[in-house]
Image (cartoon, rainbow, N blue to C red):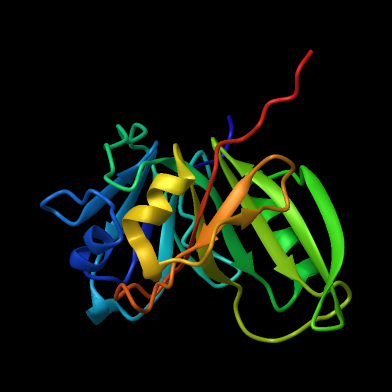
Amino acid sequence: MTVALADLLVADPPEAWREAGFAVDDDGTCRVGAVRIRLVGREHGTGIVGWALGNVPEGTTDLDGVSTTVSAAAPAQGATHPNGVTHLDHVVLLSPDLARTTAALAAVGLDVRRERDGALAGAPMRQVFYRLGAVILEVVGSPGVAGEGPAGLWGLTHTVADIDAAAALLGERTSPVKDAVQPGRRITTLRHRDLGMSVRTALISPHIRAQG
């Protein structure tokens, strides 16, 4: 069975996400497509502090330093968000040691779908892509480097029905809309700190399916 992302634990207050145009339930859960983003507050730190995955081995508690819970829950029923977000497009995981991180992911049943090499600030950089159900997992690190420390969940990109409407709603709290790396798509980055969020967050237009 396919490994799927069920929950993300984010150490943000619900009010910050509401300010960014997300609908948040009274219990602090933001339902983005099939994923529950549980806003647990600053007392748990900052950023994405853990996740829950379905169809991983029972007893899994850690994936290369990422706090992990095994989930048997049914997929969330996505909420209607004022900013027009429809689902979670991808999650970015930063790794100080790509070989170590990819081995940990393989051990719980994840297969590499694609790799892309590039550069960041003049240094080699590799992106390794996986599928967590409907969500893409993008692992980023320097090839051949065996750094110390844990991998960490770094940022989120959400698909939005109308990116221009979302940018207009958020105004100066988001960057100008520009072309994305993915052909035919456009993207904007939230000024997350201005909104009281600790997670780097982007909004992207819907995927363009190939014709024919």
Quick one: quadrant of the N terminus? top right
Residue closest to the eye, 144 or 175: 175
Measured from the top left, where is residue 14 in percent x and y? 20, 63
Quadrant assignment, res 170:
bottom left
| Residue drawn at (36%, 63%) of the image | 171
Q: Position of residue 87 (x, y in %)?
A: 44, 40
**Most extreme residue toward the top, as rendered?**
212
In this rendering, does residue 7 appear at all?
A: no
Q: Residue at 68% across / 72% down in the picture?
A: 95
Q: Is residue 161 above or below residue 82?
A: above
Furthest residue toward bottom: 148
Residue 66 image position (x, y, % from top left): 51, 68
Image side of residue 135 versus residue 106, left or right: left
The one nearer the camera, 105 or 7, is: 7
* Left or right: where 195 falls relative to 128: left
6 or 78: nearer the eye?
78
Asked if residue 197 shows in the view, the reply is: yes
Residue 74: quadrant of the picture: top left
Q: Is residue 205 left or right of residue 190?
A: right
Tell me if 199 is positioned left or right of 2 in this view: left
Foreground of the two, 80 or 205: 205
Q: Position of residue 121 (x, y in %)?
A: 80, 83
- For the image, the number of numbered tags is 0
Name the residue at 22% across, 70% down. Answer: 13
Residue at the extreme left of the image, as rendered: 26
**Residue at the image position 68 percent from the left and 61 percent from the top:** 139
Of the 4 image quadrants, the one containing the C terminus is top right
